[in-house]
Image: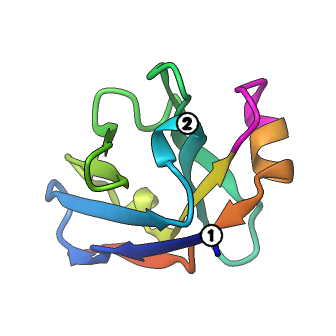
Amino acid sequence: QVQLVESGGGSVQPGGSLRLSCAASGYTASSYCMGWFRQVPGRMREGVAAIDSDGNTRYADSVKGRFTISQDNAKNTLYLEMNSLKPEDTAMYYCAADPKRWISWYIFQYTAAYWGQGNQVTVSS
């Protein structure tokens, strides 16, 4: 059974840092496209960062230079290191995984086979 279990969210002041983790089980994460999405109530879910099975990474323009996606293959875990956090980064963050090769953000978001339970990140002074 495939599972994605997230951890690491919380509250932080602007300019602070957080690291999200997404532990995968039931499959080999490094062979999948994996990514992070976020959603604010009343708004559409948006892609934040993704890494494909070749190790190529992609980022939303709003987080480039501040967020880093990585994965530890030995632990089958995906990470999102978030630095210089801003209030507009406040959202529920979800990890996602799919066995298809990367095509686009749109395809990944709307066809990803597996999703984590979500983890709240709040950036506020």
- Residue at figure coordinates x 70%, y 26% from the top left: 102
Examine the rendered structure and indicate whether residue 16 appears above or below residue 25.
above
CA–CA distance between discs 2 and 1? 14 Å
Foreground: 58 or 96?
A: 96
**Which image quarter holds the C terminus?**
bottom left
Label 2 or label 1, whichever comes before in sequence order: 1
Label 1 environment density (alpha carbons within 10 Å; few <14, some 14–19, many ≥20)? few
Residue hosting label 1 = 2
* Residue 112 in picture, x, y percent from top left: 76, 52
Q: Secondary structure at mark 2?
A: helix
Task: Give, as a single range, the part of the protein colored magenta.
Answer: 99-106
To which quarter of the image does residue 43 belong?
bottom right
Examine the rendered structure and indicate whether residue 47 appears above or below residue 42.
above
* Residue 19 in picture, x, y percent from top left: 23, 59
Residue hosting label 2 = 31
Q: Is residue 72 left or right of residue 48?
A: left
Count how many numbered circles sit on residues in the image. 2
Q: Secondary structure at mark 1?
A: loop
Task: Identify the main secondary structure in magenta.
Answer: loop
To which quarter of the image does residue 122 belong?
bottom left
Q: Are marks 2 and 1 in contact (CB under 8 Å)?
A: no
Name which residue type carries label 2.
Answer: Ser
Foreground: 70 or 17?
A: 70
* Residue 62 in picture, x, y percent from top left: 48, 36
Q: Is residue 4 left or right of residue 69?
A: right
Q: Is residue 84 left or right of residue 98?
A: left
Foreground: 104 or 34?
A: 34
Examine the rendered structure and indicate whether residue 92 appears above or below residue 79.
below
How is the rendered protein coloured? rainbow
Q: Is residue 67 left or right of residue 97?
A: left
Name which residue type carries label 1.
Answer: Val
